[in-house]
Image: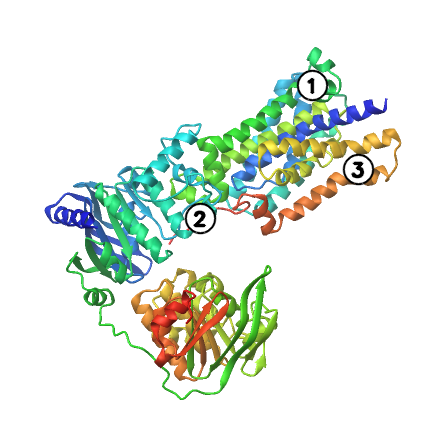
Amino acid sequence: MANLAIVTSASIQHGAGGVLALAARAVTKRFPGVIANDQVNFDLARGEVHTLLGENGAGKSTLASVLCGLYRPEAGQVVRDGKEVRLNSPRDGLAHGIAMVHQHFRLVDRFTVAENVVLGHKSLSFVLATAEIEAKVAAITEEFGLPLDPRAVVGELSAGERQRVEIVKALYQGAEILLLDEPTALLAPPEVEKLFLTVRAMTHVGKSVVFVSHKLGEVVDISDRITVMRGGKVTGSVRRGEADVRRLAELMVGREINIVSRRAKSPVGEVLLSVSQVHLERDGAAMLTDINLEVRGGEIVGVAGVAGNGQRDLAEVIAGLCAPQQGNVTVCGTPTAGRGAGGARRAGLAYVPEDRLGTGLAPSMSIRDNLVLTRVRDFLVDRKSALLEAETFIKQLEIKTPGPLTPTRKLSGGNAQKVLLAREIFAVSGARVLVVCSPTRGLDVGAVETVHALLDEARDAGKAILLVSEDLDEVMTLADRVLVLYRGRITLEQTGLDTNVDRVGQAMAGITT
Amino acid sequence: MNSNIWLLTFADAISIATTLILASLGAIITERSGVINLGVEGMLLMGAVTGFIVADGTGNLWLALFAAVVVGVVLSAIHAALTVGLRANQIVSGLAMVIFGTGLSQFIGKPIEGDPLPVIIRPLELGWLSDLPFVGPVVFGHDVFTYLTWVAAGGASFYMHRTRPGLLLRATGDAPATVDAQGGSVAHIRWVHTMVGGALMTLAGAWYMFARAAAWNQAATTNGIGWIALALVVFASWRPLRAIGGAVLFGFSLQVPFTLQAQQISVLPPTIVAMFPYLITLAVLVLLSTPRARRLLGAPKMLGQPFVRDER
């Protein structure tokens, strides 16, 4: 550990002293309707970890894409080792030792690790020297602490392991500068630790890393420097040691954020959603066992748990997407178990699934059309009023989009979620029960706040809300009551005010006292 | 006597398998790049008729086979232009290729219908090898193309699994976006392999003409073997070497009805028995249509999907 500290302080001196590995000079990049990068300056020293921090849509991924050659800027230069370079494609970037690991991996699932690593590598012989390649891959995984079996099939690897494959691929191709786009988004905490060790091993041998992230907490640990972007511009830059989380948050959001707990204000009403003795099996394995819960109007009940403990099954049973083998679900007094999603909706249920773009919204349809998609009674669509309604939502919820006819797939995660919530909370007129799954996963600080405010508003309007989330902080912030799911059973129930975070955490880990 | 006819059945099965292997190799190479060419039957017919006409005119077998290959490249280039270039529906284009190939071969083959073959591909004389009991006639009683086809299947397998372009080929069928991001050209890879595949399909048709058919007769020449070759691709789970075994099996099932008839064994009417290979083909093709089955069998993930770069 002490060793590492020395390494990083040395690299700061590099940063100040001046062996610049890579720099962007007044880079401007436009997309239809937005200036994603507006005269952005950025530099990276040899052996440095420089983080680009910002909300979704701040322009940090765009800048990284310019630096690796994926996008060509309209104005400005990319400077590598003091010389201006023209990067017309990621291949050009690679030729200059610059590689980017994208948030969505570009791997062939059916190939082995080694095959993926060498795919597209130009200097490869016609006949593959498999043993040689595997040995080289193994050497890289060893040197940089990226445990991987070169012969493993990528389709069978976890998200963290796939990311390692991407990093090995970049290193194999001789990358000196690695741009990591939201690298921790898909990782479990221990995997994040491993990734950080790898990053340090890389800077130790003089490679540089650009870390693109919106997660404030974790970047402070790893970064030598943090540059904050907002709205396509750089709003500030701090060195290691000067980083103060509150200050960084302000730079990111542009205003002070107050993290407050939100609790029910209105007296709790009648039971609108009840689940009793639900038992669900899939392929012979019990997913949910003896689930009983009630949600009343005007309250949020949070379901906490580590991913894969039955949260999704619970949400799908309530939403009517799968029928339980036993038990009842009642929405506003109507039994809905086994009546399908349509039955649940007609009874008064609104549902915000975890997969917001694939399941929640129709990606290629416009915002307007998505907003009227779940009306169960109308036959004809009144396009004029739908358009008006869409415009109102866009204004009220500050949805960043060129207009109501933009396809939802073009929206950022936060904006897509706002559209989905607007539909499920306001546009579905009769719904009094709302099931929400991981509503803020992958969203930036500002969007998280908006989503929480929306849920709070829906609660005040008397809706019964079931919030299923793996983010314990979110559950603790919003819920009036907390349930913990562990291996398909509810192992703990606490009311919000008396909630003991430690006990909830222990219950999530399977420890009950 | 009795054992003799079964010997012949095995030998014939292996012989017919040559066409099946060649055609399904063509289909495997095409499909591994993510392009499905359903036009195999039409391609076989075009290969057969082209070979016949050129051989009739020149008397040269090699020229005839070369002409068939050229026709295969041209026809599959049309398929590639439609599906890779213009991103048309591959199923529709493939079916159009069947109708086009069938119709055109019938049209240009009209004058030569019923004519005797100008050249014939004859089995090799392998000396004492051919005289071995059982193995002799069954394994060593074939023409040079049968053996070359086996070598070709091995070569295709090596190419796909052990070489750099083969790696790119497989990646293009599975994850074209990944290949694109690496700087590879998805369109180029798909064009090339569709054309190579097409060449193998017409070559299969021409060989069948000269080695197995008695005369050009559009309705009877290929007899739906092109469809069987397509089913064989699935049966072989897109692996060239597995296609050999599958082809022999299908070849056997094609040959059995004749043998049964000759032996006057009538468990079932021979017409019903003759339907079996086609029923199996139908079943396999239906199976192929469900996404789950395709994944389990190892179909290229993006088979039939035009590639469009995802741009912001």
In the displayed structure, B7 sits above or below A259; it is above
Amino acid type shown at disc 1: Phe
Q: Is residue A287 visible?
A: yes
Q: Quadrant of residue A277?
A: bottom right
What secondary structure is marked by label 3? helix
Mark 2 lies on residue = A157
| Residues flagged by tags 3 and 2 on a common chain | no
Distance Cα–Cα, label 3 vs label 2: 47 Å
Q: Are marks 3 and 1 in contact (CB under 8 Å)?
A: no
> From what the image shows, is residue A158 above or below residue B30?
below
Badge 3 crowding class, 10 Å Cα cut-off, few under 14, some 14 to 19, many 20 or more, is some
What residue is at 68 percent from the left and 39 percent from the top?
B227
Which color scheme does this rendered protein use?
rainbow
Q: Which mark is residue B140?
A: 1
Is residue A183 visible to us here?
A: no
Say what amino acid the circle numbered 2 marks: Leu
The image quarter containing residue A499 is: bottom left
Quick one: B133 or A459, which is closer to the camera? B133
Q: Chain of mark 3?
A: B
x, y (%) of residue A500?
A: 35, 75
Q: How many residues crowd around disc 2 within 10 Å: few (fewer than 14), some, or many (20 or more)? A: some
User: Residue A483 versus residue A117: which sits nearer the camera?
Assistant: A483
Q: Amino acid at mark 3?
A: Ala
Q: Give the mark toward the camera: 1 or 2.
A: 2
Circle number at residue B274: 3
Label 1 and label 2: CA atoms lie apart by 47 Å
Task: Verify CB contact (< 8 Å) between mark 3 and mark 2.
Answer: no
Point out the residue furthest to the top here. B127
Residue B250 shows which numbered tag?
none
The image shows residue A402 at horizontal and vertical percentages of: 35, 65
Q: Nearer the viewer, mark 3 or mark 2?
A: 2
